[in-house]
């Protein structure tokens, strides 16, 4: 077997020439990065399987136990833009290793927690570490993988579905044969291994100039953080039974005011926290919208498929959960195929074809199986079709923004993940709010899937605003 070929790091104008060219062994370096992303994606689903055992083990209510998931989502969304900016200011390798250390130590603390309040606080800290993985990992690929960076970045789309499928299996085994604490302990040896591998295989950061270190816009950070926190709280309240209208309105008002303040701040600041063009500038605005709608809304809709299968067709919980395996397998396979063909197809064609596949899959989920079809294989086929679409869309949507500003790779990766989170949380919260008031949740959820499909169809013209590109960037 031929040894991995060392390749010189790319030399973008913003990097200091005096640092000299770094080399990287692509195989071990990418394996290290992939292991970190895998750990994060496993954690996104493994905790959900332990909620009941966690509730009993800490003698708490299901609502407080659920905050171990909500608190993680809040911390993750709040820290994403900050992690992206820090990766560019302090260095990708430093932030990557630091994020792994924080995530691992917080995981150990979660495993040892003896009350629900401590566990929730540690989950927020764990999320702060996890938020640094994707921005710093993307920056490392862009900095050190030369002309192959578009393909390696595209492979991220096949890592996350694998972790999301492994998570419930690991979680079930931990709860069945050990304890709920095992879902957190499992991260500790993995985290230690990642740190050791990163120190060995990921090149050191180049010296950071004073100009890049200076001028951190803390006011902009605070306004964006407040906007995200209040906005996510408003969405969460919308899906919470018994939540007051006044609390929702107050949270929404705070989010809007903070959002306006953030936009004003970044337009006026000499060194804004995030350059305005990366949010709503030509090309970037369309890419962010595509990520929220085609990516985030699709993920949110698929996450509710097990609930739908149980409510509408009476499929048992275990079988309903296995429906997501079909979607995950399709996403992995077609993400790899789309990565291979991306330099020939460009970005717009796979975005359109993938979105149409998602729409057809969602309509299949919404419609009742035709005569002669049992519900389970029909739903599996429909979710498989959604997975095909998600797999085709992922490489194109991930590269479309990065190729416009590779020097801002970490911030753009954080922005992409943030918009995915926003689309997912909005879809799940709005859907659960509607279902809470429905007399027939199963039938109502079918209408929800139809509505999401219509939104995706109406959003297709956005693809024409996505900058197209063929070849390496």
Image (cartoon, rainbow, N blue to C red):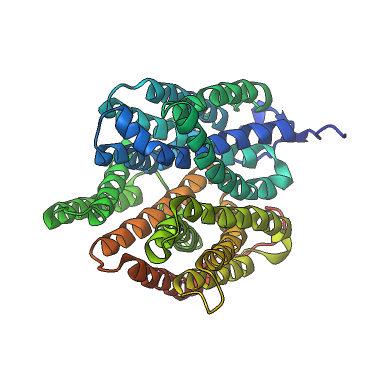
User: Residue 328, how many percent across, how many down?
Assistant: 58, 53
The vertical placement of 447 against 340, above or below, is below
Residue drawn at (34%, 52%), measured in percent from left and top? Answer: 267
Residue drawn at (42%, 65%), measured in percent from left and top? Answer: 313
| Residue 347, picture quadrant | bottom right
Task: Answer whether residue 88 is visible to the viewer in this image.
Answer: no
Name the side, left or right, on which 110 lies relative to 222.
Answer: right
Task: Answer whether residue 316 is visible to the viewer in this image.
Answer: yes
Name the side, left or right, on which 328 lies relative to 284.
Answer: right
User: Residue 295, how many percent across, how many down?
Assistant: 49, 58
User: Residue 204, how many percent across, how many down?
Assistant: 62, 25
User: Residue 5, how many percent across, how many down?
Assistant: 81, 35
The vertical placement of 188 against 317, above or below, is above
Task: Give the farthest residue toward the bottom.
Answer: 371
| Residue 59, picture quadrant | top left
Residue drawn at (44%, 52%), measured in percent from left and top? Answer: 317
Residue drawn at (30%, 37%), measured in percent from left and top? Answer: 65
Q: Nearer the viewer, residue 345 or 247?
A: 247
Task: Give the farthest residue toward the right.
Answer: 1
Q: Nearer the viewer, residue 381 or 296?
A: 381
Q: How many marks?
A: 0
Q: Nearer the viewer, residue 237 or 304?
A: 304
Quadrant in which the N terminus is drawn: top right
The vertical placement of 335 against 113, above or below, is below
């Amino acid at each position: 077997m031929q040894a991995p070929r060392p390749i010189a790091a790319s030399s973008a104008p913003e990097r200091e020439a005096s640092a000299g060219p770094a080399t990287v062994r692509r195989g071990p370096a990418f394996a290290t990065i992939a292991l970190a992303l895998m750990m994060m994606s496993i954690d996104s689903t493994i905790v959900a399987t332990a909620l009941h055992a966690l509730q009993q083990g800490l003698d708490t209510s299901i609502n407080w136990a659920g905050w171990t998931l909500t608190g993680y989502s809040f911390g993750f969304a709040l820290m994403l833009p900050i992690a992206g900016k820090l990766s560019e200011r302090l260095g990708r390798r430093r932030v990557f290793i630091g994020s792994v250390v924080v995530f691992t130590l917080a995981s150990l603390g979660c495993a040892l927690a003896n009350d629900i309040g401590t566990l929730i606080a540690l989950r927020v800290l764990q999320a702060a570490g996890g938020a640094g993985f994707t921005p710093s990992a993307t920056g490392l690929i862009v900095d050190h993988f030369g002309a192959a960076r578009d393909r390696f970045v595209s492979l991220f789309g096949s890592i996350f579905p694998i972790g999301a499928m492994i998570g419930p299996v690991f979680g079930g085994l931990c709860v069945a044969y050990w304890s709920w604490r095992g879902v957190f302990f499992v991260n500790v040896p993995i985290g230690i291994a990642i740190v050791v591998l990163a120190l060995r295989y990921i090149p050191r950061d180049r010296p950071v100039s004073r100009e890049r270190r200076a001028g951190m816009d803390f006011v902009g950070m605070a306004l964006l953080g407040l906007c995200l926190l209040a906005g996510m709280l408003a969405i969460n309240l919308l899906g919470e039974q018994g939540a007051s209208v006044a609390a929702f309105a107050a949270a929404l008002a705070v989010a809007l005011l903070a959002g306006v303040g953030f936009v004003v701040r970044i337009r006026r600041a000499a060194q804004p926290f995030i350059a305005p063009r990366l949010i709503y500038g030509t090309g970037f605005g369309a890419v962010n919208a595509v990520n929220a709608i085609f990516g985030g809304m699709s993920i949110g809709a698929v996450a509710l498929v097990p609930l739908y299968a149980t409510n509408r067709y009476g499929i048992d919980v275990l079988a309903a959960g296995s429906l997501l395996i079909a979607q995950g397998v399709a996403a992995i396979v077609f993400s790899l195929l789309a990565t291979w063909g991306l330099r020939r197809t460009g970005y717009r064609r796979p975005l359109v074809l993938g979105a149409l596949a998602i729409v057809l899959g969602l309509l299949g989920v919404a419609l009742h199986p035709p005569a002669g079809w049992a519900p389970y294989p029909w739903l599996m086929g429909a979710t498989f079709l959604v997975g095909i679409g998600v797999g085709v869309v992922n490489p194109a949507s991930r590269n479309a923004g990065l190729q416009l500003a590779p020097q801002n790779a970490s911030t753009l990766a954080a922005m992409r993940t943030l918009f995915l989170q926003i689309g997912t949380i909005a879809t799940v919260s709005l859907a659960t709010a509607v279902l809470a008031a429905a007399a027939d949740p199963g039938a109502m959820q079918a209408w929800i899937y139809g509505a999401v499909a219509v939104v995706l169809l109406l959003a297709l013209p956005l693809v024409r605003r996505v900058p197209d590109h063929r070849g390496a960037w």
